[in-house]
Image (tube, rainbow, N blue to C red):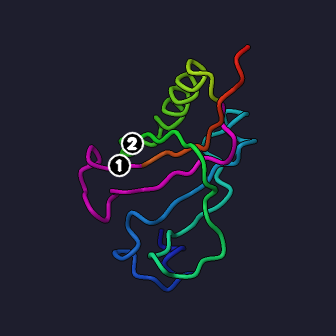
């Protein structure tokens, strides 16, 4: 977060809830959930931006992020859920921190959104 603050010149209190990381679909397929391939800041409405998230269906899960060691478990649950409903990941996962130590020192209140674009698999 500090590095992003220095690069962007934006006060971290202004970007809380707008910072995200992505995990490539290749790393998702390899169960490598700790290798991030990009970091971003969501723009305010009306601001120009270079990139945007692709449209479509996403599975979105809100998780307690106070203990990052559980991240692989969350992804495993997501992929089990998708498989049980005949869906599969179709792009990079997005992790967006909503509540972290800048907002609350209580780790049980830390919240991260995990969003993965998905597509329905044809019936077999």
In the foreground, 12 or 122:
122
Please identify the quarter of the rendering in which residue 121 is found. Answer: top right
Please identify the quarter of the rendering in which residue 104 is found. Answer: bottom left
Sequence-wise first label, 2 or 1: 2
The x and y percentages for residue 79 are: 58, 28
Q: Is residue 7 magenta?
A: no
Identify the residue shown where x is 62% and y is 65%.
52
Q: Residues within 10 Å of mark 2 (few under 14, many from 20)?
A: some
Residue 62 badge: 2
Q: Residues within 10 Å of mark 1 (few under 14, many from 20)?
A: some
Dot 1: what SS?
A: strand
Residue segment shown in magenta:
88-112
Identify the residue shown where x is 54% and y is 33%.
75
Identify the residue shown where x is 74% and y is 13%.
124
- In this rendering, the answer to whether 107 lies above or below 83 is below
**Measured Cα–Cα span from mark 2 to mark 1:** 7 Å
Identify the residue shown where x is 29% and y is 48%.
107
The x and y percentages for residue 23 are: 64, 49
- Marks 2 and 1 in Cβ contact (< 8 Å): yes
Please identify the quarter of the rendering in which residue 101 is found. Answer: bottom left
- Position of 74 with respect to 28 (left or right) is left
Q: Is residue 98 magenta?
A: yes
Residue identifier under label 1: 111
- Position of 17 with respect to 121 (left or right) is left
Dot 2: what SS?
A: strand
- In this rendering, the answer to whether 32 lies above or below 73 is below
Label count reads 2
Q: Nearer the viewer, mark 2 or mark 1?
A: 2
């Amino acid at each position: 977060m500090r590095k992003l603050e220095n690069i962007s010149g934006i006060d971290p209190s202004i970007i809380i809830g707008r910072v995200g990381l992505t995990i490539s679909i290749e790393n998702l397929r390899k169960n490598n959930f700790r290798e991030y391939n990009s970091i971003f800041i969501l723009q305010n409405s009306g601001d120009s931006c270079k990139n945007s998230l692709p449209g479509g269906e996403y599975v979105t899960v809100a998780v307690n992020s106070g203990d990052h060691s559980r991240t692989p478990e969350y992804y495993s649950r997501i992929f089990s859920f998708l498989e049980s409903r005949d869906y599969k990941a179709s792009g990079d996962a997005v992790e967006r921190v909503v509540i972290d130590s800048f907002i609350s020192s209580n780790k049980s209140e830390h919240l991260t959104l995990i969003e993965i674009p998905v597509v329905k698999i044809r019936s077999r």
